[in-house]
Amino acid sequence: MPLVRHVCFYTYDNRMERHGPASWNSLSKMRFDILTLFPEMFPGYLSQSILNKSIQRGLVEIHVHNLRDWTTDRHQKMDDRPFGGGPGMILMVEPVVKCVREVRALSDDPGQLILLTPQGETWNQQRVEGLASGPQRFLLLCGRYEGFDQRVIDILEPLEISVGDFILNGGEVAAMVLVDSLVRMIPGVLGDEKSSWDDSFSRGNRLLEYPQYTRPREFEGREVPPVLLGGNHEEIQRWRQQKSLENTRKRRSDLLTDPESTDP
Ligand SMILES: C[S@@+](CC[C@H](N)C(=O)[O-])C[C@H]1O[C@@H](n2cnc3c(N)ncnc32)[C@H](O)[C@@H]1O
């Protein structure tokens, strides 16, 4: 029986097939292993826009594994009723732990295991930047139904991450959010690296971004601010800093150390 019984592998140059798993570590790319009961949710998302281009250019590798392939009974049962009663079904500990251990062993780098759960730490840009600056392998464990048997967490000790204070039907969309935000941090993924500094919440100043305009200069009587048309880069920079601060004070004063100050 092969170690991994089901893997969807998304990469451009198929280096894994040509050189085998040992070669993965020598490649400077971000690698994701997504562990899910619904692997078919991912191809559409992966084949679009920046993510697709990053895969094509060999900057990102994504492997999607079907948790059900680690079940041992002939019905491929992954869930069972909760002890003590209550609604819904719980993901069973044995196939999940086996799956994580086997997928981890596919590379010398064990990677960071992340379990998607509404009970986890809230995902934000500082967390994105922190994780992106560490080891470049992430295992994303997606829940379904009423979530995981607690022993999955006790045994594997994952980083538990929530994408917000609301309940999704499963961890797949949350996993896509993590992939999407992390790949933006890889040098070369964005056309202009500066945007990953200047975007709202980002390392440039942690504030909301300033307003942006493009052609036409006037639409339905609304004109582009003249300072943006004058070509004076220092003035433009000052105007943007000021607008960024105003925007943040108005909408997200929690991001400012001193909401009254003219400094962030
Ligand atoms: C219906 S939820 C289970 C919620 C669980 N009963 C609770 O109250 O904490 C099913 C799965 O969706 C995922 N999920 C739901 N909301 C999420 C969120 N806000 N952030 C990350 N994952 C979430 C998790 O993987 C979870 O195991």
Image (cartoon, rainbow, N blue to C red):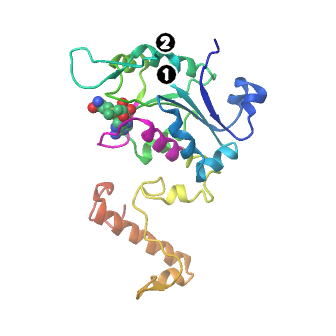
Q: Which residue is mark 2?
A: 74
Does the stretch in magenta take in 141?
no
Q: Which label number is shown at residue 237?
A: none
| Residue 101 place in picture, x, y as percent | 53, 17
User: Foreground: 200 or 141?
Assistant: 141
Tag 2: amino acid = Arg
The answer to whether residue 121 shows anywhere in this view is no
| Residue 16 place in picture, x, y as percent | 72, 30
Disc 2 crowd rating (10 Å Cα; few below 14, some 14-19, many 20+) is few
Q: Is residue 188 above or below residue 150?
A: below
Is the residue marked 2 within 8 Å of ligand 1, measured from its CB?
Answer: no
Cα separation between marks 2 and 1: 11 Å
| Residue 12 place in picture, x, y as percent | 71, 41
User: Which residue is at a point 60% across and 20% down the rendered structure image?
Assistant: 5
Extent of the magenta region: 160-182
Q: Which residue is mark 1?
A: 68
Q: Which quadrant of the render holds ligand 1?
A: top left
Does the stretch in magenta take in 181?
yes
